[in-house]
Amino acid sequence: MPNNEMTQKLNEIVEDAIEMLENIEYKEYIEENVMIELNSTQLVEGEEQHVDLVTKGIYFVDEKGYHIEYEETEATGFNGSTSAILYQPQYDRITMERTGENATQIIIEKNKRHLCNYGTPYGMLTIGVRGCKIKADLNEDGGILAFTYTLDVNTALASTNSINIRIKREN
C-alpha cells in the first residue's frame, strides 16, 4: 500500500498548491493611453537606417510582464499593422508581435538564438534572432526599454538592430 499513501500525499500537495495559486492576487494596472517614443537603428552591410516614431499607444502591467501596444505608421513601413511588445523581467525576455499584412513574431533573450517567423511582402521567413542587450527601467507609470539584437538567415548575419522605447503616461 505504499503507492496509495504516496498518491494520497501527492494529491494533498497538488490541492494545497492549487489553493495557494487561487489566493494569489496579481497587481494589475488598467490599460491607459500613453505616448510612445520609439527610435530604431538597423545596420545592414555597413549602412545604417533610422526610424523615429512618436505615437499614442497602450501600456499596462500584469502578471506576465510589461505590455506596450501601438499602431504602425508609414514611417515604420508597416502602415495598418499593430505591434505589441511584452517584456518579461523574470525571464529577461522580450516578445515582439506585429499583426497585419506582414505578421511577425520574434523573441529576444540575451545570448540566446531563437528561430522566429518574420513576415515580408514576399511571404513568411524563418529567421534567427539573437539577443545582444536588454536594458529596462519600467514601472506602472512607464519608463524606458532598450534592446539590441541580430537577425540572421541560414546563420548568415542579415542585420543588427537597436530599439529604444520611452513610455510616458498622458495627463
Image (cartoon, grey):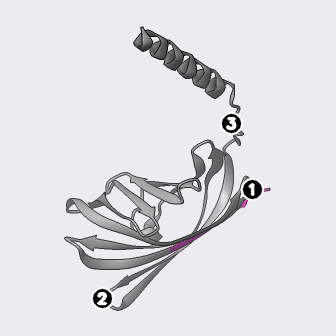
Q: Amino acid at mark 2?
A: Glu
- Classified by dominant secondary structure, the portion drawn in magenta counts as strand
Q: Is residue 5 left or right of residue 33?
A: left
Sequence-first tag of 3 and 2: 3
Picture residue at 30% right of the left edge, 88% below the top: 45
Element under disc 2: loop
Q: Position of residue 18 (x, y in %)?
A: 58, 22
Marks 3 and 2, how far apart at CA = 46 Å
Picture residue at 23% right of the left edge, 61% below the top: 125
Label 3 vs label 2, nearer the camera: 3
Residue 105 visible to the viewer: yes
From the viewer's perspective, is residue 145 above or below residue 5? below
Element under disc 1: loop
Q: Residue furthest right?
A: 171
44 inside magenta stretch: no
Label 3: few (<14), some or many (≥20) within 10 Å? few
Marks 1 and 3, how far apart at CA = 17 Å
Q: Amino acid at mark 3?
A: Tyr
Residue tagged by mark 2? 45
From the viewer's perspective, is residue 92 above or below residue 23? below
- Magenta highlight range: 163-171
Quadrant in which residue 157 is drawn: bottom left
Element under disc 3: loop
